[in-house]
Amino acid sequence: MTLPLLPFYLPDSGKFVVTSSILFSKKAENVKQNPKVSLLFSNPEGSKAGKHAVLVQGVADADDSDLDHGWEKYLSYWRKKEPYIDAYLTEREKFGWFWKRIVVQVEPKKILAWKNGDTSRPPEVFGA
Amino acid sequence: MKSLDYQRLGNFRYAVITLVGDDGFPFSVATDFKILPDKKIVLQKPALPSKLDGKRVNVLFNHIRGLPGGGYGDRRYMLVWGTTHEDHGTLRFEPETVSEWDEKILPFDQYCAKSAPQGAKYLGKLQASVEA
């Protein structure tokens, strides 16, 4: 199952993080069944990867031990990408279940990169 | 299956093909596509995966627009499951099922409300695992 997401990169660990509301938790259920995942950065508007396309294949872990607060440590990353998120936070009670969030960390194992997004050519492969 | 709205599908600029590779990892690749007058969906064949004939895949069509002050708008996607067939250097895509969201059709707060059953299901499973 492929879905648009808002991932954050954690330079200290080299991992990516996605937080998911329980409202849209099918992906977290899938991770619990099979931790092998991929993150594709291909849309210049969303990925900020310029014209290039990058696929990160890795192993994911879904942490739902603290749905109410476990994700809050990533708010600063989120705020940089979506500054208006604070408006939703001030209405936290109204969007109660939206703010019950699972933290999914992805440890990269292999990265494939298509220069200029040209997928008619084979990608460069790192970490194979 | 929920019917595929070809007119709205035609408003997307590119497609992402995903299938599970031999190593067990999902492999996703972006490519161009076009819709023929007879509503056949034709994907440009990427270099990889090399064999896509008869493969069950999902194809994501998505759109997002960066906002001047940061953040995103005009979010929409169609996720279509189907089968690809190699055809003269291109891929003919036969759609089977579709799920989608377009915030202009279903505003985000309504999308959240509509998704409550999935939230309840997740909490129910979590509760059961805690009690086990």
Image (cartoon, coloured by chain):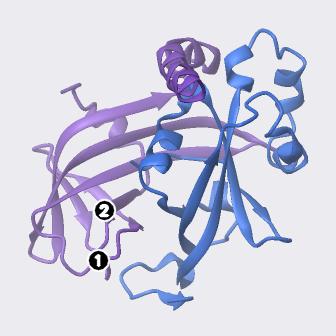
Figure quadrant of the N terminus of chain B: top left
Q: Quadrant of residue B111?
A: top right
Q: Residue at x 76, y 63 (%)?
A: A9
Q: Is residue B33 above or below residue B113?
A: below
Of B107 and B37, the residue lying toward us = B107
Query: In screen coordinates, is A9 left or right of A55?
Result: right
Q: Residue at x 84, y 47 (%)?
A: A74
Residue pushed farthest front?
Answer: B132
Residue A88 position within the rendered picture, expressed as x and y whole percent measured from the top left: 82, 22
For the question of whether residue B86 can be seen, the reply is: yes
- Location of mark 1 (residue): B49
Determine contact: label 2, label 1, CB under 8 Å: yes
Q: Is residue A61 above or below residue B76?
A: below
Q: Earlier in the sequence, mark 2 or mark 1?
A: 2
- Location of mark 2 (residue): B19
SS for tag 1? Answer: loop
**Chain B on-screen colour:** purple
Query: In screen coordinates, is A6 left or right of B88?
Result: right
Of B45 and B55, the residue lying toward us = B55
Residue A115 position within the rendered picture, expressed as x and y whole percent measured from the top left: 55, 84
Of B5 and B82, the residue lying toward us = B82
Q: Quadrant of residue B69?
A: top right
Query: CA gap, disc 2 to disc 1?
Result: 9 Å
Which chain is depicted blue?
A
For the question of whether residue B103 can be seen, the reply is: no
**The residue under label 1 is which amino acid type?**
Pro
**The residue under label 2 is which amino acid type?**
Leu
Dot 1: chain letter: B
Residue B100 position within the rendered picture, expressed as x and y whole percent measured from the top left: 40, 32
Residue B123 position within the rendered picture, expressed as x and y whole percent measured from the top left: 57, 21
Q: Is residue B45 above or below residue A86?
A: below
